[in-house]
């Protein structure tokens, strides 16, 4: 009997060891950054109750965007194949999806000048003949900063009166916005981009309503795509919800999004510089963390210094199975703002895995 128990114990131990090695190899395949290296650029400690202090110094306002260097930009730009480009932004229009739960404004556009109106008003005093000869059209817009394809600045969410790096609202937030960590500080972004197509990996067009993306979902998708994340990547998650973008009510209704374990995996294990998705709020609701209604946002922005991009158009990349690319994006320099519209593009690169077979 004892001999049988001993044999059973050895078998159990072997199974556990094999499982551990298998899990380790999966993580290693998903992330090229050793965990210790990824964590070295993370503010410590991460408690969930306090903001992160920047490893780049007390005056840092851009967090992990500091991972972008001339060398890293040169590395990805040197691999562009010069063939095709992908527009990752959406159109702005009246009736577009937007966050209304807290009373923020819809997108609006109105004409300030029209050819016919100019004939009637003659605002520049040019006379009827000139206004008939030269037509004049002008427009103005109004929008909430968190609508359309946009990037969140690190002042968007904080904890206990502080934002990233310990900046306090009572010292740095005036009537004209933040004097620190505003969207005007976000530099032009040139980095390696990676698409993690969770919907495609699960064999569905779109993740179910309210689905919370897990760490295992990301690892599985990366494995199926044959992709490895590297420190300093722009990592974009596809849920498939963008297919409903033209129908605001469908797009906004209980969208799938990221969970805490998935967010931690991207940052702490894989060293992501920026994360983004094709939904409006990046994370799934309701919150999975007690006493915090937006735990993924506050974790990424306030604790880790990771900017978030939302409403990123990923359908074309998914359709053509382009998983690695040069990401290039410039956001509007809205002084003191907590976010800004961004027009990102993806440029395929040489050496990326050709998913029709082999390498390109």
Image: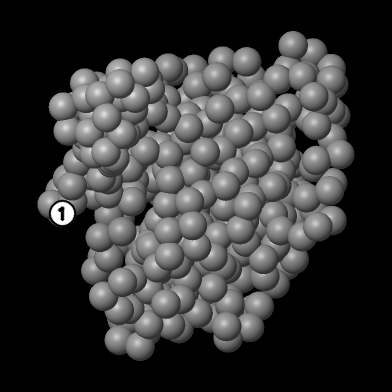
Point out residue 278 in the picture as x, y percentages from the top left corner.
43, 34
Q: On the image, which quarter does residue 158 sit in?
A: bottom left
**Image side of residue 195 versus residue 125, left or right:** right
Q: Does residue 294 sit above or below 354 in this rendering?
A: below
Percent coordinates x, y for residue 302 in the rendering: 44, 70
Question: Quadrant location of the C terminus?
Answer: top right
Q: Is residue 51 left or right of residue 197?
A: left
Residue 189 visible in the current orientation: yes
- Element type where label 1 sits in the image: loop
Q: How many numbered marks are there?
A: 1
Which residue sits furthest top? Answer: 356
Q: Name the residue under label 1.
A: 102
Where 77 sits versus 302, above or below?
above
In this picture, residue 238 sits left or right of residue 293: right
Estimate the x, y position of residue 96 in percent, counting from the top left.
Answer: 26, 30
User: In the rendered view, how is the structure colored?
Assistant: one colour
80 or 165: nearer the eye? Answer: 80
Residue 277 at x, y percent in the picture: 46, 39
Disc 1: CA contacts within 10 A as few (<14), some (14-19) or many (>=20): few
Residue 7 seen from this side? no
Please tell me which residue is depicted at 38% across the width and 22% down the height of the picture.
134
Residue at 84% across / 56% down in the picture? 71
Looking at the image, residue 270 lies above or below residue 302: above
Nearer to the camera, 64 or 187: 187
Identity of the residue drawn at 25% across and 24% down: 128
Q: In this view, does 115 lie to the left or right of 59?
A: left
């Amino acid at each position: 009997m004892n001999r049988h128990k001993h044999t059973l114990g050895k078998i159990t131990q072997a199974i556990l060891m094999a499982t551990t090695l298998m899990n380790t190899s999966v993580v290693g395949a998903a992330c090229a950054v050793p965990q210790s290296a990824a964590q070295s650029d993370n503010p410590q400690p991460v408690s969930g109750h306090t903001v992160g202090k920047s490893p780049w110094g007390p005056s840092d306002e851009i967090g992990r965007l500091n991972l972008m260097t001339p060398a890293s930009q040169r590395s990805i730009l040197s691999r562009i194949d010069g063939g095709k480009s992908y527009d990752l932004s959406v159109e702005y229009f009246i009736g577009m999806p937007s966050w209304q739960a807290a009373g923020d404004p819809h997108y609006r556009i109105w004409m300030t000048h029209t050819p016919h109106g100019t004939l009637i008003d003659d605002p520049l005093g040019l006379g009827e003949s000139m206004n008939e000869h030269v037509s004049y059209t002008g427009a103005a817009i109004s929008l909430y900063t968190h609508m359309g394809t946009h990037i969140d600045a690190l002042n968007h969410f904080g904890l206990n009166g502080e934002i990233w790096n310990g900046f306090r609202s009572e010292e740095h937030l005036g009537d004209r916005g933040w004097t620190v960590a505003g969207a005007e500080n976000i530099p032009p972004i040139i980095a390696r981009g990676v698409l993690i197509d969770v919907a495609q990996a699960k064999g569905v067009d779109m993740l179910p309503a309210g689905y919370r993306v897990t760490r295992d979902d990301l690892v599985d998708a990366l494995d199926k795509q044959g992709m490895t994340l590297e420190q300093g990547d722009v990592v974009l998650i596809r849920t498939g919800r963008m297919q409903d973008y033209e129908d605001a009510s469908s797009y906004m209704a209980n969208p799938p999004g990221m969970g805490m374990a998935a967010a931690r995996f991207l940052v702490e294990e894989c060293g992501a510089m920026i994360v983004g998705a094709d939904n409006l709020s990046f994370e799934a609701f309701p919150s999975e963390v007690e006493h915090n209604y937006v735990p993924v946002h506050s974790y990424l922005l306030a604790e880790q210094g990771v900017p978030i991009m939302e409403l990123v158009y990923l359908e074309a990349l998914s359709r053509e199975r382009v998983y690695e690319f040069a990401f290039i994006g410039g956001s509007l320099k809205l002084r003191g703002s907590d976010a800004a519209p961004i027009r990102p593009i993806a440029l395929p690169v040489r050496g990326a895995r050709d998913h029709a077979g082999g390498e390109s």
